Image: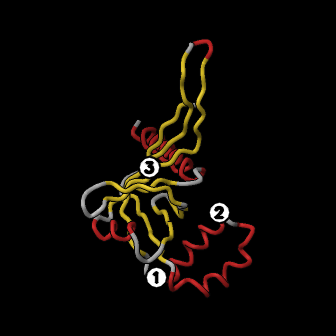
Amino acid sequence: MKQMRKSKRERDEQWALDVFDRAPYVTVSFTRPDGTPYGLPLSLVRSDRRTFYFHCAAEGEKIDCLRHSPVVSLSAVSRCTPKFEEEKDNFTEYYHSAVALGVAEVVSDDEEKIKALRLLCERFLPSHMDRFDAAIARSLAITTVIRVSLTEPAVGKCKP
């Protein structure tokens, strides 16, 4: 019985991770130094079950927030279909969504930065990978990469 619960939990987590993988943007919510929330949609890529990456400038509000608190929340919607159900005389919405909590930190290792940037480019601009190495040579030193390590499994919800 215990084995069945574990496999269902793993299937549920994988389903939620698939939502993140299909979503064009993931909303990352930070905490500002004054305690107020700061959430914005970003282009993230996942490298394994617990690790996501995004890139940003070396200075700015995201970095200020991370210096204050590295804890972030991720949320994504990969399907959103509003519908009026005639037979029920009902307004509803069909959706696939996922959330996760993690800790974000700046990646300092150049090999990991290149790996993350390659994953991002392969996901969002795969037809331009022939220019990847030249772009890395020009901009690696001035590009900040953030790693988000999940602190608990991703969870998802849906209304098919």
Q: Which residue is mark 2?
A: 124
Of residues 51 and 76, the one nearer the viewer is 76
Q: CA distance from mark 2 to mark 3?
A: 22 Å
Direction from residue 63 to residue 46 in the image, left or right: right
**Residue 109: which numbered mark, if any?**
1
Residue at the spot 55% in from the left edge and 62% down from the top edge: 45
Q: Which residue is mark 3?
A: 154
Q: Position of residue 57 (x, y in %)?
A: 47, 74
* Discs 1/2, front: 2
Residue at the spot 56% in from the left edge and 49% down from the top edge: 18
Of the numbered discs 1 and 2, the one sitting upstream in the chain is 1
Q: Classify residue 67 by image quadrant.
A: bottom left
Amino acid of disc 3: Ala
Q: Please, is residue 57 above or below residue 152 in the view?
A: below
Of the numbered discs 2 and 3, the one sitting upstream in the chain is 2
Residue at the spot 58% in from the left edge and 50% down from the top edge: 23
Q: Is label 1 in a helix, a strand or a loop? A: loop
